[in-house]
Structure formats: C-alpha cells, structure tokens
C-alpha cells in the first residue's frame, strides 16, 4: 500500500498493524519526523512493514515505478491541491492492474450545511456558489464534487467502483468535543454515521466523500 500525504502516520501504522506492507509519502518534514518517532515505538514486526519517504504526492513518478502498489490511499490531501487532475493521474499509474485507489475529499455539495446549521446565513448563501472554503486550520482550500471526480477517475483508467459519505451527523460538533464516554452510545453514533454514509440521500450531503476507483 502507498499512503500519499500520510501526515503523522496514524493511518499507515494502523494498516501495518493489520499485516499490510505500507509506504508512507509525506512532504512536511515535521509531520514525517512525528511519523518516524511513532514508528520507532512499534514492535520490529510492524516496523519492518513500513517505509517512510519524504516527497510530494504530485511527484510519485520520481519515487516509484508504475504499477508498484495494490492500493494507493490519498486521504485529506486533494483539498490542498489547486489542480488535482495531474496528481490523480500519477496516483493511478502507481496501481497494479486491479489495484484500488482510495480518495477521501471534502464534499463541495455540502459546503452550505456547516455554516447554515450554525446560523451563519451569509456564509451558507455564499457556499452555494463556490467550491472553496476555510477549513478548521484557517486555510482557504478547495472541495470536490462527486460527478467531477467520477469523470476524472474514468479518464485515468481507474473508474469509480463505490463511494460513501463520511461525517454527516458529527460534522457540526465543536472543535475539541470528546466522543461519548459510554461505549454503547459511541457504538450507536458510529453505526448511525456508517448507515448514513451508505444511504441516499444522506451520503450525498456528508462533509466528506470516500471514493474507490479500480485500475482497469
């Protein structure tokens, strides 16, 4: 597996603990150092399944040969890329035949929900006519639409296989709010989110979209 824009390595380590061989690619030196420190605390059997590389997700061809991976993950990255098509084409080239491209993106068709549910009517109205937004880090970034990404995936020979919504009911929770302490209540919350993410029309207005393309 290739985890592009792996951040502090949380996802890569979780996959390695599950038995997968993972390469993490990250351009931020501080994030990469955090990932290396976390990896160093893992048992040897997990450490040997993880390779961490400093590099840009838009330049995967510099680091890897085409067809090198069974799965390529790009989660929470595309919103920081102003012109994502070339990057997506590069990611698709990294896939072996039948390989899976997993994308987690901000849903442009839901941008009005957060300000609207918070009573920010001016912000909600403005969000209908844009695909950019200010994230919780205070950065102006971009969102994607399902129909556009579907066409892009078809054009790079990794057509859409399945898609889900992510974070519908919990998107409006205040920053720093803890999840329910009661395990049964937490399970109900996760089950509600999971079902909404698989069910129309709810999944179409989730804060995030999780798309899977399969290399032909």
Image (cartoon, rainbow, N blue to C red):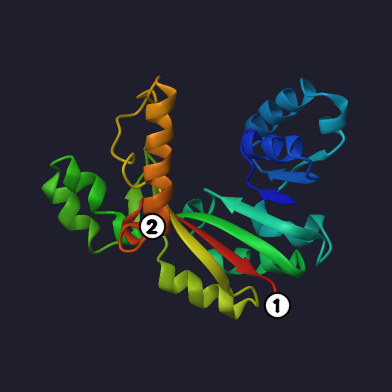
Which label belongs to residue 216? 1
Which label belongs to residue 4? none
Which label belongs to residue 107? 2
Q: Is residue 195 above or below residue 86?
A: above
Residue 131 is situated, as x and y percent measured from the top left of the image, at 34, 61
Residue located at (53% from left, 74% from top):
152
User: Circle 1 sits in a helix, a strand or a loop, which is it?
Assistant: loop
Quarter of the image holding residue 174? top left
Q: Is residue 68 above or below residue 27?
A: below
List the single residue furthest toward the front.
184
User: Circle 2 sits in a helix, a strand or a loop, which is it?
Assistant: loop
Residue located at (37% from left, 58% from top):
203
Residue 151 is situated, as x and y percent measured from the top left of the image, at 50, 77
Quarter of the image holding residue 59? bottom right
30 left or right of 148 in image: right
Regarding residue 131, the answer to whether it shows in the image is no
Discs 2, 1 touching: Cβ within 8 Å: no
Residue located at (60% from left, 68% from top):
213
Quarter of the image holding residue 132? bottom left
42 left or right of 58 in image: right
How many marks on residues? Answer: 2
Q: CA distance from mark 2 to mark 1?
A: 26 Å
């Amino acid at each position: 597996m290739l985890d592009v824009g792996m951040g502090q390595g949380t996802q890569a380590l979780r996959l390695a603990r599950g038995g997968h061989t993972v390469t993490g690619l990250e351009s931020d030196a501080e994030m990469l150092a955090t990932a290396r420190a976390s990896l160093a605390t893992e048992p040897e059997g997990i450490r040997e399944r993880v390779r961490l590389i400093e590099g840009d997700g838009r330049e995967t061809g510099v680091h890897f040969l085409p067809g090198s991976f069974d799965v390529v993950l790009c989660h929470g990255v595309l919103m920081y890329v102003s012109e994502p098509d070339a990057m997506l084409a590069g990611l698709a080239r990294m896939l072996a035949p039948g390989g899976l491209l997993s994308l987690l993106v901000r849903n442009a068709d839901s941008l009005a929900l957060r300000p609207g549910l918070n009573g920010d009517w001016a912000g909600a109205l403005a969000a209908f006519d844009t695909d950019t937004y200010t994230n919780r880090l205070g950065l102006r970034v971009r969102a994607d639409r399902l129909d556009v990404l579907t066409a892009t995936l078809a054009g790079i020979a990794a057509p859409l296989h399945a898609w889900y919504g992510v974070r519908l009911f919990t998107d409006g929770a205040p920053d720093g709010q803890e999840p329910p302490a009661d395990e049964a209540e937490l399970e109900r919350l996760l089950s509600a989110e999971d079902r909404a993410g698989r069910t129309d029309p709810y999944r179409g207005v989730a804060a995030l979209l999780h798309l899977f393309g399969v290399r032909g």
